[in-house]
Image: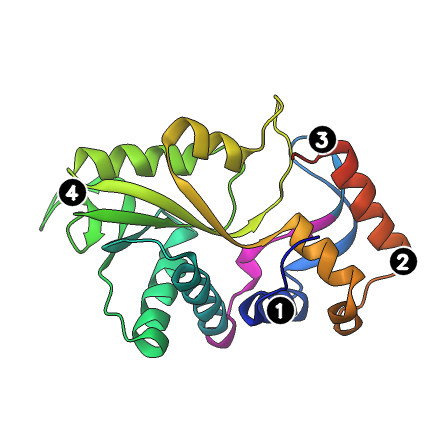
Amino acid sequence: MIAAMQEYQLTFIDLALGRNALRFGSFTLKSGRESPYFFNAGLFDDGEALAVLGQCYAAALQRSGLQYDMLFGPAYKGIPLVAATAVALAEHHRRAVPWAFNRKEAKDHGEGGTVVGRKLAGRVVIVDDVITAGTAVRESVELIRRAGAQPVAVLLALDRQERGLGTTSAVQEVEATMGLRCVSLLTLSDLIETLAGPAGDRVRISDAQLAALRAYRERYGVA
C-alpha cells in the first residue's frame, strides 16, 4: 500500500484529466506495446494549466527535501516546465531559484553558447516531463558537468514504472547509471491506488479500465 496521496498529486491528476493530457483506452506506444493509458504533457498548453503544473512541480520538489542551487530545463519541453517551476517556487515557497535552459544549436553571435539564463553552477535539478530512453537527461548531465556544475536530480511529471529493454525502468536506469535522484509528481502505482481508493470517485474511469492498468503493470512493471 502506498502512502497517502499529497494534495499536489491529486491536483495534478485533476489537471491532467481536465486538459486531456492523461487518457485511458488503448494506445500503441513507440515501443510497440499496447498501453491502457497515455500521457502527453504538451497538452498543458495555456497559461492557467502551466501555472497549476508549475505549482505541482514546486510542491513535489519542496517535499523531496533535496538540497539544490538551481534548475535546468532541457529543450524543448523542459523550457516552459523549468520556468513555471521557478515562478511557483518564488510565489508559493519564497525561494528565488535561478534557472536556465539549453538551445539545440549553439548561438554564433551575441553572447553565444548553448545555455540561456543563469550560468550553471552548484547543485542542479533537471526539470522535464517524462523519461523514456533517457537521452535528454544524459545530454543535460553532460552539459551541466562540462560547465563545472553538479547534476543532483531529475524532477518529472510521471514515472511509468515500466521496464525498458532490460529488467529496469528508464527512471531506475538513470538513478543507477547517472547517480541522480528522480522525483516524480506521480507514478503508475500512485495513479492506480488513487483510482482504486476513495479519491477515485473524482476520476471518470471504468472498472475495466482500472483492471487494464493493473494488468499492464503486472506485465511490464518494475519493482
Residue 102 located within the stretch drawn in magenta: no
Q: Amino acid at mark 2?
A: Asp
Please give the range of residues in magenta.
37-49
Q: Residue 70 location, x and y as percent? A: 25, 55
Q: Which badge, 2 or 4, is on the more N-terminal residue?
A: 4
Q: Is residue 48 magenta?
A: yes
Rendered view: 142 above or below 181: above
Looking at the picture, tell me which residue is in the foreground, 51 or 9.
9
Dot 2 alpha-carbon crowd within 10 angstroms: few under 14, some 14 to 19, many 20 or more? few
Residue of label 2: 207
Left or right side of 39 for 218: right
The C terminus: image quadrant: top right
| Closer mark to the observer between disc 3 and disc 1 | 1
Identify the mark nearer the N-term, 4 or 3.
3
Q: Of circles 2 and 4, which is in front? A: 2
First along the sequence among labels 3 and 2: 3
Measured in 3D between alpha carbons, the distance from the residue under mark 3 to the one under mark 1, in whole angstroms, is 30 Å
Badge 3 amino acid:
Gly
Q: Which residue is mark 4?
A: 113
Q: Earlier in the sequence, mark 3 or mark 1?
A: 1
Q: Identify which amino acid the numbered label 4 is placed on.
A: Gly
| Residue denoted by label 1 | 10
Q: Please say if the residues under marks 3 and 2 sit with CB atoms less than 8 Å apart.
A: no
Q: Secondary structure at mark 4?
A: strand
Q: CA distance from mark 2 to mark 4?
A: 52 Å
Q: CA distance from mark 1 to mark 4?
A: 40 Å
Q: Earlier in the sequence, mark 1 or mark 4?
A: 1
